[in-house]
Amino acid sequence: MATPLAADRFLTALLDEGLDVIESGSWRTHNRNHKGPWGPVHGVMMHHTVTKGTSTTVRIVKDGYSGLPGPLCHGMIAKDGRVHLVGYGRANHAGLGDPFVLAAVIAERTPPTDNEATVDGNRHFYGFECENLGDGQDPWPEAQLLAIEKVAAALCRAHGWSVKSVIRHLDWQPGKVDPRGIDWPAMQARVDKRLGKKAPEKPVTQTPPPKAPVVDLSQLVAAAKSNPKAAGTPVTYSGVKVVEAALVDAGLLSKRYSDGHYGTTTVTAYAAWQRSAAGGNYRGKEADGIPGKASLTALGKKHGFTVVS
């Protein structure tokens, strides 16, 4: 637990770690503090942007989208390794997550598999978006990986944290996959070494992948037919977020609409999946955007979740 660093101390910590930092506008006062508290902070969370092009990405993470106002992080780590500071204070990056993961971060233990979304992460984590398409194919240049390492180490050093205080969005919120494509155990080893820990004598091995989320078809269909459409209203079934994350990965749904509400935009995206070859080549009423078992199973098989009836 810690009080957030003052903005100037935050900047100094990054510069002292050897990072190339670009200050974007009035980043020190650009925040969402009027929507809730900022702090105490417990760790650092890494994301990917699902965008291409540094200037476009900076604008998006700074200003946000309709329905998801910026800033969407505190800093954006570009492909070239430069860190663009876009906000400071409460930012729309983490959303709701697992209380047991938060407890593990506070205790600096390896977090359990996330299966709840009930705790406000925007209050408790520094957030960094990393410029990457998030499709598992877009490369992570060494300059960018080095910057991720330095950012994590800088904030851990400033707060006296270990590498266990650095997590991914996928560790926090069910259905998330970011930052996709990074060898996380290797990155943890890099951060640990930078913090002055003894390097492991044996090669770092991959940890087992997180347990695949489970989506209940009957609950999902009920949510699709009854979920409230207004952003910010309660979500009737958490599995909606898992399916929306898969539709984002499939390129059928904008990330800004991955909000847990099975509204008209998600219906349209799922209908596109049903019409696709991978989703079953359905037509007419069979491609109405309401999930069926065959199309949902195909989506889960491709994007990492299992389906129960």
Image (cartoon, rainbow, N blue to C red):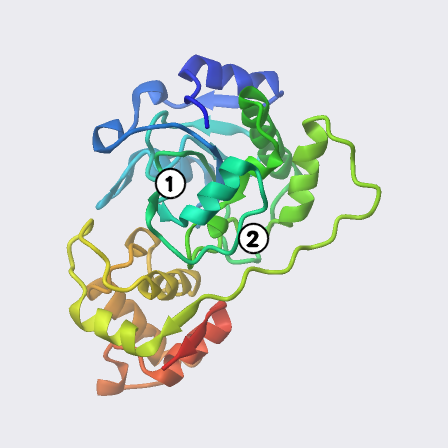
Residue 131 in view: no
Q: Quadrant of residue 60?
A: top left
Q: As rendered, which of 210 and 137 lies closer to the eye? A: 210
Secondary structure of residue under mark 2: loop
Three-letter amino acid code of the residue under disc 1? Gly
Q: Residue at x 38, y 63 (%)?
A: 242
The picture places residue 72, in percent across and down from the top left corner, at: 35, 38
Q: As rendered, which of 303 and 196 lies closer to the eye? A: 196
The picture places residue 97, in percent across and down from the top left corner, at: 39, 48
Report the mark closest to the observer, 2 or 1.
Answer: 1
Residue 301 in view: yes
What label sits on residue 254 in the rendered view?
none
Q: As rendered, which of 264 and 309 lies closer to the eye? A: 309
Q: Earlier in the sequence, mark 2 or mark 1?
A: 1
- Residue of label 2: 138
Residues packed near mark 1 inside 10 Å, few (<14), some (14 to 19) or many (20 plus): many
Q: Residue at x 35, y 19 (%)?
A: 28
- Residue of label 1: 121
Could you tell me how far apart the alpha carbons at marks 2 and 1 are, in whole angstroms?
27 Å
Q: Residue at x 32, y 30 (%)?
A: 90
Three-letter amino acid code of the residue under disc 2? Asp
Q: As rendered, which of 40 and 16 lies closer to the eye? A: 40
Point out the residue furthest to the right here: 201
The picture places residue 31, in percent across and down from the top left corner, at: 30, 27
